[in-house]
Image (tube, rainbow, N blue to C red):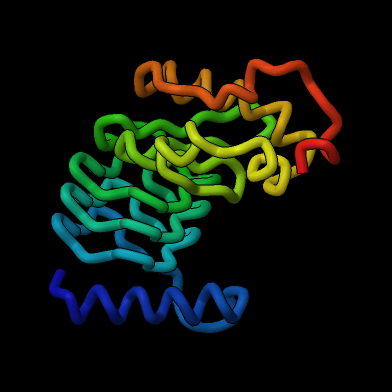
Amino acid sequence: MNATELRKIIDEHKVWVTSLRESGSRADLRDADLRGADLCDADLCDADLCDADLRGADLCGANLRGADLCGANLRGADLRGADLRGADLRDANLPDHTFVIMGGPYYLQISNGEYVRAGCQNHTVEQWRKFTKREIAEMDGKKALKFYPRLLEIIDFYLGAGEHPDWVNEPETDTEEAA
C-alpha cells in the first residue's frame, strides 16, 4: 500500500469517526503491510488493524482507542504518546518495554520504556518520578495522590528502580495542604 492509498483510507476513517459512523468508512487495514509507515498523530480509533505489519511504524501520538490490533506486529514501532485504551492487543507483538496494565483505578500504558500514560496524563518516566505533590494533586486530587506511590512502584517493576520524590514517604496530609 502506498502513502496516497493509506492517506485516503485514513481520511475516510476520520469522516467515519467524526460523523458517528453515518458517512465515510471504517479503516480496514487488516493484513496491511504498513512497515515503517508514518502514522504519527493519526486518528485510528476503532480501526481494523488485525494482523497488520506495523514493524517500525511511527505511531507517536496516534489515537488507537478501541482499534483491533489482534495479531498485529508492532515490533520496533514508536508508540510514544499513542492511546491504546480499549484496543484489542490479543496476540499482538508489541515493542520492547511496552505494556498495557489494567485493573487499577487508572488505565496504564508504558510505551517503549519512555512514556507512561496514567488515565489521561501522559509523561516521560523521568517526569513521573519528579512530580511535586502539588502537580500530582492538580491531576486528580486525592485519588491521584493516593495512587501516585503505587504508580511509581509499577514503573519500577516494569522498567527498573528509579528515584522517588521525598514527599512520597511523608505522612499523608490533606490535599488542600498539598496544593
Query: Percent position (x, y) of residue 58?
Result: 24, 57
Quadrant of residue 41 in the image?
bottom left
The answer to whether any part of residue 100 appears in the image is yes
Query: Percent position (x, y) of residue 150?
Result: 60, 21
- From the viewer's perspective, is residue 10 above or below residue 81? below
- Along the horizontal axis of the image, is 40 left or right of 137? left
- Identify the residue shown where x is 63% and y is 22%: 168
- Identify the residue shown where x is 52% and y is 52%: 66
User: In the image shown, does 50 or 63 lie closer to the viewer?
Assistant: 63
Quadrant location, the C terminus: top right
- From the viewer's perspective, is residue 71 above or below residue 80? above
- Identify the residue shown where x is 16% and y is 50%: 56
Query: Percent position (x, y) of residue 163?
Result: 44, 22
User: In the image shown, does 65 or 49 lie closer to the viewer?
Assistant: 65
Number of marks in picture: 0
Query: Percent position (x, y) of residue 178?
Result: 76, 37
- Identify the residue shown where x is 72% and y is 41%: 137
The answer to whether any part of residue 92 appears in the image is no
User: In the image shown, does 63 or 52 lie closer to the viewer?
Assistant: 63
- From the viewer's perspective, is residue 68 above or below residue 101? below
Quadrant location, the N terminus: bottom left
